[in-house]
Amino acid sequence: MTFDRKIKIAPSILAADFANFGAECEAIEAQGADWVHVDVMDGHFVPNITFGPATCAAIRPHIKGVMDVHLMIAPVDPYIDAFAAAGADVITAHVEAGPHIHRTLQAIRAAGAKAGIALNPGTPASAVEPLLDMIDLVCVMTVNPGFGGQKFIDMTDKVRALRGLIGDRPVHIEIDGGVDPDTAPLVAGAGADVLVAGSAVFRGGSVGNPAPYGDNIRAIRAAAEGVYA
Ligand code: DX5
Ligand code: ZN
């Protein structure tokens, strides 16, 4: 994985056909996705359950690029090695998931993955400040995590504050929740470079008819690049 601040579109397979993850990952990459975003939920940290490391390992051979694993689970630490072994390039944990986020980030890097930290809408940018030199990505949640298809919560000020705190460090700012061609410019203009989108990528398409995925990805990218500073 190389670092850059170009806009990257990361479709969330939470909005894909769960019976067809391999083919869905191949379809979105063929249609222009930069990263594949994988939402892991435990029914405890968030009120929904998706899947775990075995599913991540199963889909890994179907992803050529970056596999971006977003852990919405608590505790995190007992499962880090399993997600790294499953082939995650980025492992993101929530700062709200436990009392020892510093230890968690150390463990993610020790396992050989890039370390991400996610902030719920109610958590301030300042929570990341002591951790800036141990992260590769900060994920700003623009919905309360747990479900796809929710309404975007404007976190533009938080994104701008994080961009200032990050300075020249090679740390991505990722936005997750309610991203579409209308909301993408707000966060891209504030300094975000990785845009996760579930519903707005998968709507209208399927494995059998993947062209709408490409149209949707291009629409989000164009909207974001129009304002990206
Ligand atoms: C929310 C997940 C997101 C979400 C994105 O808990 O982390 O990745 O599914 O889906 P949309 O784009 O539909 O809001
Ligand atoms: Zn996510």
Image (cartoon, rainbow, N blue to C red):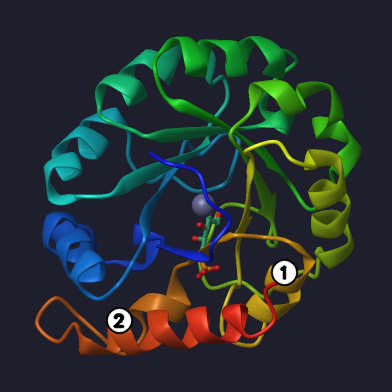
Which residue in the protein does label 2 denote? Answer: 213
* Residue 204, image quadrant: bottom left
Residue appearing at x 58%, y 86% in the figure: 223
Tell me, yes or no, whether the two marked residues, 1 and 2, touch with CB atoms within 8 Å.
no
Q: Position of residue 66 (x, y in %)?
A: 34, 46
* Label 1 residue SS: helix
* Label 2 residue SS: helix
Q: Height in image: 186 above or below 57?
A: below
Q: Position of residue 208 (x, y in %)?
A: 9, 82
* Residue 176, image quadrant: bottom right
Which residue in the protein does label 1 denote? Answer: 187
Residue appearing at x 16%, y 62% in the figure: 26
- Relative side of 66 to 157, left or right: left
Residue appearing at x 64%, y 40% in the figure: 171
Q: Is mark 2 within 8 Å of ligand 1?
A: no
State the CA–CA distance, disc 1 to disc 2: 21 Å
Q: Height in image: 175 above or below 135?
A: below
Q: Where is residue 181 in the image (x, y as percent from the top left)?
A: 57, 86
In the rendered structure, which amino acid carries the disc numbered 1? Val
